[in-house]
């Protein structure tokens, strides 16, 4: 079936590829988290369930968390395998679908980027806006860190930060495209990027912070956990971007093209 | 010069941008579903709870920590 010159991507085809990429990315993230993240989670849980053995500082929070650890609704063995895989797989699937939709909107609208160039832009921008910046403003905590009393506020702010950061990133891309009409592309991109960083910086300074790491919690363990957390998210984004990019290129080849694009 | 540019051209023209009208229903439907999934992985039975008990929280516990969401 010959297609006209104004043929466009089928959103359905993009979404299917995004979901496949999401599942693969989620499983890759599970592999990374199981190897590099679980040791620090396990050590932190060890500190959580045996608070008297090592410290004098956090007796205020220890009893409640002690009870919590003893309930054992789901065993540790299930949590670190099936539970972790389900969480990263489901989150990967969701992110993959959103990735495909972001690509559908971004393609052809951010400069003259090729399909694969747009995938890279969405992947890098998505990682920075939805994972890296929220990570820097509200760093994730391992078990035994964080007081149960502030969980509501912390959850609201963590989700709010992801939403705001993504919104601001989209806004800065939009402004960058407008600025590109007045300046050249480099200057416009730099101005938009600097604008995003300044607004995020102001938000980070104004929004409440939480310093809830018990004095006795090992600094090296906190670092290991946070690095593993960032690595897990980076693996997820990289996996989704690479798989989506490959599936997209294959779909654009002449023989499979009619499945990928629809007449404009 | 003209030869090299013609060689680097794709064999078939690249698709044009997807009209927003075509992407919008998918974006709304899939977006809402995806956010619901993210809610269950990231927040259910933590700060807020739709299903009673601790099962969801405990099951996704490690993933919630390592994906950067506040857990408890």
Image: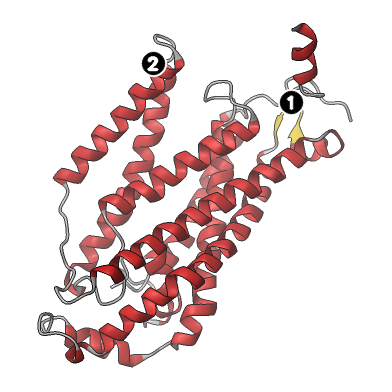
Quadrant assignment, res A218: bottom left
Instruction: Name the residue rendered at 56%, 65% in the picture.
Output: A89
Q: Nearer the viewer, residue A48 or A101?
A: A48
Q: Quadrant of the C terminus of chain A?
A: top right
Mark 2 closeness class: few <14, some 14–19, many ≥20 residues within 10 Å: some
Identify the residue under disc 1.
A7
Instruction: Answer yes or no: is residue B33 visible.
Output: no
**Quarter of the N terminus of chain A within the rendering:** top right
Relative to A14, A88 lies left or right: left
Whether residue A220 is situated above or below residue A81 in the rendered picture:
above
Q: Position of residue A112 (x, y in %)?
A: 58, 21
Q: Chain of mark 2?
A: A
Residue A259 x %, y %: 79, 40
Q: Is residue A228 above or below residue A10?
A: below
Residue A203 is left or right of residue A95, and the answer is left
Instruction: Let me know if residue A226 appears in the view.
Output: yes
Mark 1 or mark 2, whichever is nearer to me: 2
Residue at the spot 15% in from the left edge and 63% down from the top edge: A211
Among the 4 quarters of the image, the one containing residue A109: top right
Identify the subunit bearing mark 1: A
Q: Are the residues under badges 1 and 2 in a single subunit?
A: yes
- Above or below for A192 versus A163: above
| Foreground of the two, A192 or A39 | A39
Check disc 2 and report its element: helix, strand or loop.
helix
The dot on residue A138 is none
- The image shows residue A4, relative to residue A198, as above or below, that is above
Q: Which residue is mark 2?
A: A179
Number of numbered discs overlaid on the protein picture: 2
User: Image check: A255 left or right of A204?
Assistant: right
How many angstroms separate mark 1 from mark 2 (CA)? 29 Å
């Amino acid at each position: 079936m010959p297609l006209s010159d104004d043929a466009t991507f089928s959103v359905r085809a993009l979404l299917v590829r995004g979901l496949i990429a999401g599942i693969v990315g989620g499983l890759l993230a599970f592999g990374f988290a199981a190897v590099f993240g679980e040791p620090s989670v396990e050590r932190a849980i060890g500190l959580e369930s045996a608070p008297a053995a090592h410290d004098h500082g956090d007796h205020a929070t220890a009893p409640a968390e002690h009870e919590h650890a003893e309930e054992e609704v789901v065993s540790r063995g299930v949590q670190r395998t099936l539970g972790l895989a389900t969480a990263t797989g489901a989150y990967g699937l969701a992110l993959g679908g959103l990735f495909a939709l972001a690509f559908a909107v971004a393609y052809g609208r951010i400069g003259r980027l090729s399909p694969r160039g747009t995938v890279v832009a969405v992947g890098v921008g998505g990682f920075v806006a939805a994972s890296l910046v929220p990570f820097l403003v509200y760093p994730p905590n391992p078990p035994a860190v964080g007081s149960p009393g502030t969980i509501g506020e912390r959850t609201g702010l963590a989700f709010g930060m992801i939403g705001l950061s993504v919104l601001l990133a989209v806004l800065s891309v939009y402004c960058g495209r407008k600025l590109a009409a007045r300046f050249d592309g480099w200057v416009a991109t730099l101005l938009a990027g600097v604008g995003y960083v300044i607004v995020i910086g102001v938000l980070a300074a104004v929004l409440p912070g939480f310093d809830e790491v018990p004095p006795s919690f090992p600094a090296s363990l906190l670092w290991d956990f946070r690095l593993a957390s960032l690595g897990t998210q980076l693996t997820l984004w990289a996996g989704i971007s690479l798989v989506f990019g490959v599936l997209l290129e294959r779909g654009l080849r002449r023989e499979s093209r009619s499945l990928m694009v629809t007449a404009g | 010069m003209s030869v090299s540019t013609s060689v680097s051209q794709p064999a078939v023209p690249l698709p044009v941008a997807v009209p927003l009208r075509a992407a919008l229903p998918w974006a709304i439907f899939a977006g809402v579903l995806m956010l619901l999934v993210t809610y269950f992985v990231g927040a259910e039975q933590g700060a807020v709870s739709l299903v009673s008990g601790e099962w969801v929280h405990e099951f996704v516990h490690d993933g919630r920590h390592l994906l950067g969401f506040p857990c408890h």
